[in-house]
Image (spheres, rainbow, N blue to C red):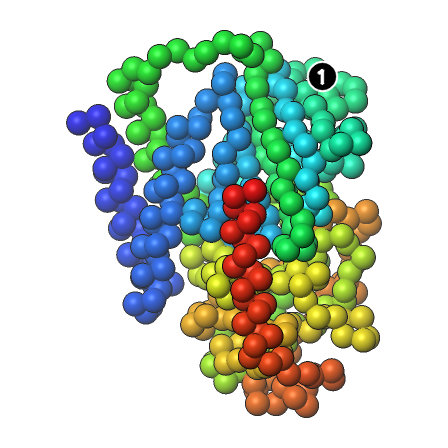
C-alpha cells in the first residue's frame, strides 16, 4: 500500500503519546490524543507544502495544530526554499505590533535547534505608504529589500505578532521562485505521492519527539515555581527576549508574577501544558499581552496563576493543569534587557491575595465573561482575516 509508511508512523506516534513520561491522569492522555490529531494535520500539510520551486506560505501552527509552546499572540507562516534559487516575497503590512522574517537551515529535531541564517523585522525593509512591500531572497543578493541566502538555507519563517487582539489586523504575504513565475509544476505521479506520505510520517514522529525533548533542555532543569531573568530566545530571533519556568501548584495556591510594564512594543505572558503546547487561549484567559493586562499605578503588572478564581483581571487560568510551563516574551526591542526588567515570583494562598496584592480590585463576573467573549471574537477574526 502506498500509504503504509504513514500508517506505520501513526502507530508509532500513538505509542509516543501514550508512553510520554509526564502522563499521570486521564486528562493528560486525552490532551495527548488531541495533540496527536493536530500533529497529524500539521504533518500532512507540511509534507504537501514541501514545494521549493513553486512555494507558498502555510500556517506553521495554530489553535488546532499546536506545537512548541506556540505563542497565542503570534501567527506563524513558513515556506520552503532552495539555497541556490532566488525568491520574491510580496505583501502588505498589517497593523500588528511586529512583523519578522527568519531564514533557517532546517527544521527542529530532538537534538538540534535549527541555525538562524538571517533574522530581521520590518524596520529593516522599505515599505510603501500603503503598506505594500517587495523582498528578494537569493544567493549573493544585496541592497534595499534584498537578502542573501546562505548555503543550507531551507525555510523562510514569518511571524505576525499581536498586542491588541481586538483592533490589529494581519497583513498579506505571497512567495514565488523568481524564475518560475508564470510556469506550472509537473503533473502528480504515484511515486511523488508515495514520497510525500513517507515524508509526512517522518515529520510527525520528529515533531512529537522534538517537542517532548525540548522542555528537558530549556525548562525542567530550572527550580520549580521560578522564572529566569530575561534572556535572548534560542533560535536566533534577534529582537526577542524571554523568561521561562515551570510550575507545580496546589489548587489553593497562587503564583504571583510581578514584572515591570516594559518599553518593548510587545510584551506577553502565557501558560503551557506538559505537552509543550499553549493552553486553551480562546475560551480561557491563559495568556495576556501588556495591552490586555491591567498595569498597577506603580508601573508593575501583577499576574495571578491559579486554579481557583482569584477574582482579579490578570488571572491566568490553569484550566486543571497542576503542572505546566510559563513564558514571558518581549519583542521588537531596541535595547538589551537586564534582570531588572524581569519577573519576581511569589507563591501565596489564594485566600490571602486581597492582602498580598497592593492594588487588589475584584472583577465582576459579567466583566470577566466579556473578556472571554472578546478573546473568542478576536481569534475568530484573526484566523479568517
Residue 323 on image: x %, y % = 46, 69
Q: Is residue 206 visible?
A: no
Residue 210 on image: x %, y % = 44, 45
Residue at (60%, 13%) from the top-left corner?
A: 178
Residue 256 on image: x %, y % = 63, 76
| Residue 95 sits above or below residue 164 on the image | above
Viewer-closest of 185 and 138: 185
| Residue 46 sits above or below residue 285 on the image | above
| Residue 47 sits above or below residue 109 on the image | above
Q: Helix or strand or loop: what does disc 1 sit on?
A: loop
Count of numbered badges drawn on the protein = 1
Position of the C terminus by quadrant? top right
Residue 184 on image: x %, y % = 46, 11
Tell me the quarter of the picture where residue 372 sits: bottom right
Position of the N terminus by quadrant? top left
Q: Is residue 311 visible?
A: yes
Residue at (38%, 45%) from the top-left corner?
A: 39
Horizontal side of residue 122 vs 200, given as left or right: right
Residue at (32%, 35%) from the top-left corner?
A: 201
How crowded is the residue under tag 1: few (<14 C-alpha within 10 Å), some, or many (20+)?
Answer: some
Residue at (30%, 67%) from the top-left corner?
A: 26
| Residue 287 sits above or below residue 13 on the image | below
Horizontal side of residue 198 vs 261, given as left or right: left
Name the residue beneath numbered marker 1. Answer: 141
Amino acid at each position: 500500500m502506498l500509504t503504509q509508511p504513514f500508517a506505520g508512523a501513526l502507530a508509532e506516534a500513538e505509542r509516543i503519546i501514550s508512553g510520554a513520561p509526564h502522563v499521570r491522569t486521564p486528562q493528560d492522555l486525552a490532551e495527548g490524543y488531541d495533540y496527536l490529531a493536530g500533529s497529524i494535520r500539521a504533518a500532512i500539510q507540511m509534507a504537501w507544502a514541501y514545494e521549493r520551486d513553486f512555494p507558498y506560505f502555510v500556517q506553521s501552527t495554530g489553535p488546532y495544530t499546536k506545537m512548541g509552546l506556540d505563542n497565542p499572540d503570534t501567527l506563524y507562516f513558513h515556506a520552503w526554499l532552495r539555497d541556490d534559487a532566488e525568491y520574491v516575497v510580496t505583501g502588505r503590512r498589517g497593523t500588528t505590533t511586529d512583523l519578522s522574517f527568519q531564514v533557517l537551515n532546517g527544521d527542529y529535531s530532538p537534538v538540534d535547534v535549527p541555525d538562524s541564517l538571517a533574522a530581521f523585522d520590518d524596520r529593516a525593509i522599505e515599505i510603501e505608504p500603503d503598506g505594500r512591500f517587495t523582498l528578494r531572497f537569493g544567493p549573493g543578493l544585496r541592497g534595499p529589500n534584498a537578502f542573501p541566502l546562505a548555503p543550507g538555507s531551507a525555510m523562510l519563517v514569518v511571524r505576525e505578532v499581536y498586542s491588541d487582539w481586538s483592533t490589529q489586523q494581519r497583513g498579506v504575504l505571497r512567495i514565488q521562485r523568481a524564475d518560475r513565475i508564470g510556469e506550472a509544476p509537473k503533473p502528480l505521479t504515484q511515486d511523488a505521492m508515495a514520497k510525500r506520505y513517507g515524508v509526512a510520517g517522518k515529520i510527525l514522529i520528529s515533531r512529537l519527539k522534538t517537542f517532548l525533548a525540548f522542555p528537558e533542555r530549556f525548562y525542567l532543569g530550572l527550580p520549580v515555581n521560578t522564572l529566569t531573568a530575561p534572556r535572548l530566545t534560542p533560535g536566533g530571533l534577534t529582537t526577542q527576549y524571554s523568561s521561562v519556568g515551570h510550575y507545580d501548584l496546589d489548587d489553593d495556591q497562587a503564583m504571583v508574577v510581578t514584572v515591570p510594564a516594559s518599553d518593548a512594543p510587545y510584551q506577553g505572558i502565557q501558560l503551557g501544558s506538559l505537552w509543550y503546547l499553549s493552553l486553551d487561549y480562546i475560551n480561557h484567559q491563559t495568556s495576556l499581552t501588556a495591552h490586555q493586562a491591567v498595569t498597577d499605578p506603580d508601573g508593575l503588572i501583577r499576574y495571578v496563576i491559579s486554579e481557583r478564581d482569584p477574582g482579579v483581571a490578570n488571572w491566568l487560568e490553569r484550566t486543571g493543569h497542576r503542572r505546566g510551563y510559563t513564558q514571558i516574551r518581549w519583542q521588537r526591542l531596541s535595547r538589551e534587557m537586564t534582570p531588572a526588567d524581569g519577573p519576581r515570583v511569589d507563591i501565596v494562598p489564594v485566600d490571602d491575595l486581597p492582602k498580598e496584592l497592593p492594588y487588589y480590585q475584584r472583577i465582576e463576573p459579567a466583566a470577566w465573561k466579556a473578556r472571554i467573549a472578546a478573546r473568542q471574537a478576536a481569534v475568530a477574526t484573526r484566523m479568517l482575516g
